[in-house]
Amino acid sequence: MLRQLLLTIESRAKLLTLCAMCTGSLTAHADWQLINADSQLSFVSIKATHIAERHSFSRLSGRIEESGRAHLTVDLGSVNTGIEIRDQRMRDLLFNIVEIPNAKFTTDLNVNAANALRAGEQTNLLVQGKLSVHKLSVDIETELSVVRLAENRVIVSTKTPMLLNASSLGLAEGVEQLRAIANLPDISLAVPVTFQLLFEKTP
């Protein structure tokens, strides 16, 4: 009787261990999903030679796959400059969101380095990615900071601004239209971009 009871307890213990292993495996292999409400992406425009203004996008989506492949999609229609008429001009003249609603950035992250972090620890990753706007793409190399907030939460951010050129993304004509309608002497085609993105792992 005692032996049968011990065997039953042992069998249940093995079953619980197996369940725990399966649960851990699922968590380990889950994608990291971007939390839009706690993320931000900003860019700076420079007009009339010396006047710099900070803008942002309010709708971002993305994920980091188990393989380390990372995706970020920016809703260009969510541009926020703090001035409504300027937002509308950017949507219509610069981004032409009817035809080009999104910009997409993809890269590969060293997930082993990120997974090795404990809560509160940080590491830097040098990555090479591709930014695509409509049919045009540019290669980007940048250094990212990864901070582990908790077992299932990380923040990925730019260490230094990414420097983009509107011309290489097919946006130079739109910049010129903005310059003309605002009656400005110039608007720089060089655009510094920064982001801070919160990702959460879901089982």
Image: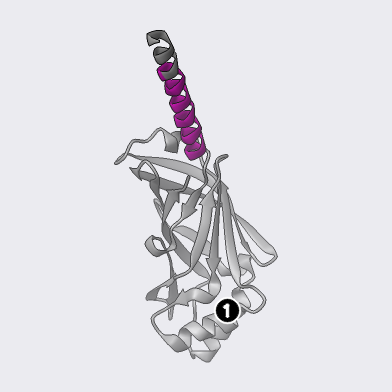
Where 110 sits versus 198, above or below? above
Residue 82, position as x, y percentages in the image: 38, 81
* SS for callout 1: helix
Q: Is residue 17 magenta?
A: yes
Q: Residue furthest right?
A: 135
Q: Amino acid at mark 1?
A: Leu
Q: Which residue is mark 1?
A: 94
Where 55 sits versus 139, above or below? below
Where 30 sits versus 51, above or below? above
Q: Residue furthest left?
A: 120
The secondary structure that dominates the magenta segment is: helix
Q: Is residue 38 magenta?
A: no
Colour scheme shown:
one colour
Question: The N terminus lies in which quarter of the figure?
Answer: top left
Query: How many numbered discs?
Result: 1
Residue 16, position as x, y percentages in the image: 44, 27
Residue that appears at 40% across and 15% down: 5
Residue 197, position as x, y percentages in the image: 42, 56
Q: Which residues are magenta?
A: 9-28
Residue 60 in view: yes
Where 8 sits versus 29, above or below? above
Residue that appears at 44% across and 62% down: 36
- 145 or 181, which is in the foreground? 145
Within-10-Å neighbours for mark 1: few <14, some 14–19, many 20+ = many
Residue 149, position as x, y percentages in the image: 33, 45
Residue that appears at 49% across and 78% down: 187
Q: Quadrant of residue 83?
A: bottom left
